[in-house]
Image: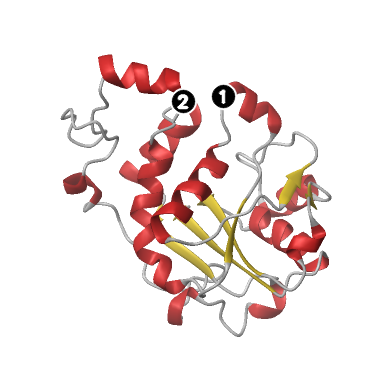
Amino acid sequence: MSILEQVVRIFAPLSCIGCGTEQDVLLCDSCAQGLETVVPRCYRCKRATFGFSVCADCQPTTPLRSVVVGYEFDGLAKDLVHRIKYERAQAGTGEIARLISALSGNLPEGAVLVSIPTASSRVRARGYDHTALLTRALAQKTGRRSARLLGRRGQAHQVGSGRTRRLSQLSGAYYAIRPEAVEGRHLVLVDDILTTGATLETAAHMLLQAGARRVDAIVFAQA
């Protein structure tokens, strides 16, 4: 949390977006219980699977082996992400990390958390990279390692784009910052929203090409 945000929170504590009570959190525990959770399933076809693994039918179509999803992207989950992305509510990244940290048991031991880089134009507008903050917060809450291993080229925004268009826009968008740190590693991508899966798949392809042994993912919500 930045010094400016700490000062602001002293004079204007956060209120819960669900019940409106001033609790210095964006989503209190009581309201968080109302979020629509996701049962373990394949992120591609949404067929029930063990531990959020990709089902046998979808495995040939994706480089990811599992994608852990916390919640449906609706209601308060959608409002929370909106506050983080468009209202500069940086503190919300820690709250998302707290909410999905309970799912860390579905992540392999020893895997390294890797954030999906945000377009630099978005980072400048917000003043922070929300996925980087989310990844670091999740690492702290779960006791796992995180590493900045992906960089991003270009400024294409995928909001509202279909899967085919997203894949086209993201072609060549990511690159391995330190290939030597990727080689032989089991990596887990971290992101806030899963829509078509194109972003996660493009990033996973790049990490595998750089020598990663396996790539999984964990996301807060799926649209």
**Residue at the limit of the structure toward the top, as seen here:** 11
Residue placed at 36% from the left, 70% from the top? 39
Q: Is residue 222 visible?
A: no
Say which of marks 2 and 1 sits in front: 2
Q: Count the marks: how many? A: 2
Residue 183: x and y in percent read 77, 69
Mark 2 or mark 1, earlier in chain: 2
Which amino acid type is marked by label 2? Ser
Q: CA distance from mark 2 to mark 1?
A: 10 Å
- Color theme of the render: secondary structure
Q: Position of residue 7 (x, y in %)?
A: 35, 17
> In the picture shown, does residue 207 fall above or below 173?
below
Give 27 or 8, whichever is nearer the viewer. 8
Type of residue at label 1?
A: Gly
Q: Is residue 157 left or right of residue 80?
A: right
Q: Residues within 10 Å of mark 2 (few under 14, many from 20)?
A: few
Residue of label 1: 127
State the image quarter where residue 198 is shown: bottom right
149 or 46, nearer to the observer: 149
Kindly state the secondary structure of the residue where label 1 is placed.
loop
Which residue carries the number 2 mark? 2
In this image, 113 relative to 92: left or right? right
The spot of residue 38 in percent (x, y) is 37, 64
Q: Position of residue 221 (x, y in %)?
A: 44, 53
Badge 1 local density, few (<14 within 10 Å), some, or many (20+)?
few
Q: Residue at x 71, y 48 (%)?
A: 166
- Quarter of the N terminus within the rendering: top left
Residue shown at the point (75%, 33%) measured from the top left: 155
Secondary element at tag 2: loop
